[in-house]
Image (spheres, rainbow, N blue to C red):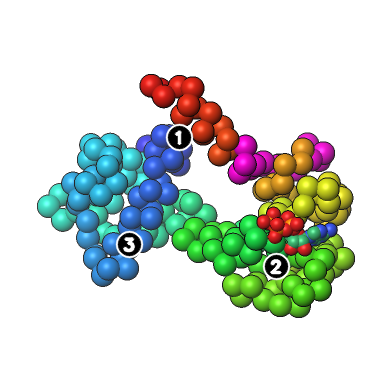
Amino acid sequence: MNQEQNKIPRATAKRLPLYYRFLQNLSASGKKRVSSAELSEAVKVDSATIRRDFSYFGALGKKGYGYNVQSLLTFFSSALDQDEVTKVALIGVGNLGTAFLNYNFLKNNNTKIEIAFDVDPSKVGTKIGDVPVYEIHQIGEKIKEEDIQVAILTVPVHVAQSITDELIKADIKGILNFTPARLNVPSSIRIHHIDLAVELQSLVYFLKNYPED
Ligand code: ATP
């Protein structure tokens, strides 16, 4: 039984962030208890599935009483590692980079952009959305000092690889690459590539060519 509780099925794990977000809202509005029917209505998952999902986390619900919002939140936050913040650096404070600094993934409170880098002297030394912008030459030193594990790359394409090489030297673990560059990295480093122009083009292509799907 205990072993089963430790091993949450994939499908259940995928619903965790959804439950977590909704419970945070409930808690913020002062609600102490919630029934599986109420949860079902809000997150559009049937209540039998919710009860089964929650049974993996131990018997947290009581008949006629519902679930205690706070204890569910405590459970979810540790299951989702919300207590441990992953520190992120952003390189290239242009239009896109500035938007990320202002947004700073606040609703997703386990990641936070701590520092940013740029070459432009009018940006270096300023703070955007509370995040300090450093001169690009300080990248190695600052990333190590702040123990940053993830970098967001929003620089022009022609400097993307050389900056990536610096990030590798600074022991970064993952890169979210918003440039169109295909970056070379050792297999120990994970890269996720998001090309917004390609995504948009692809969406339009599918709408035009497969309107029925
Ligand atoms: P975006 O593509 O984000 O909309 P933009 O069009 O405002 O940006 P870009 O020319 O793409 O500007 O540059 C993005 C940012 O990267 C700028 O703030 C620029 O100063 C910065 N940048 C350019 N070269 C480097 C470099 N070698 N190191 C760090 N930052 C750089």
* Mark 1 neighbour density, 10 Å: few (under 14) some (14–19) many (20 or more): few
Q: How many marks?
A: 3
Q: Compute the Cα span from label 1 to label 2.
A: 34 Å
Q: Does residue 116 show up magenta in the picture?
A: no
Which of the two marks, 1 or 2, is nearer to us in this view?
2
* 88 versus 168 height, above or below: below
Q: Which residue is mark 2?
A: 115
Seen at 22% across and 56% down, the residue is: 34
Q: Earlier in the sequence, mark 1 or mark 3?
A: 1
Q: Nearer the viewer, residue 158 or 47?
A: 158
Q: Are marks 1 and 3 in contact (CB under 8 Å)?
A: no
Left-right relation of 53 to 154: left
Q: Nearer the viewer, residue 73 or 42?
A: 42
Question: What residue would you read off at disc 3?
Answer: 25
Q: Quadrant holding ligand 1?
A: bottom right
Q: Residue at x 51, y 33 (%)?
A: 204
- Residue occupied by mark 1: 10
CA separation in Å, label 1 and label 3: 24 Å
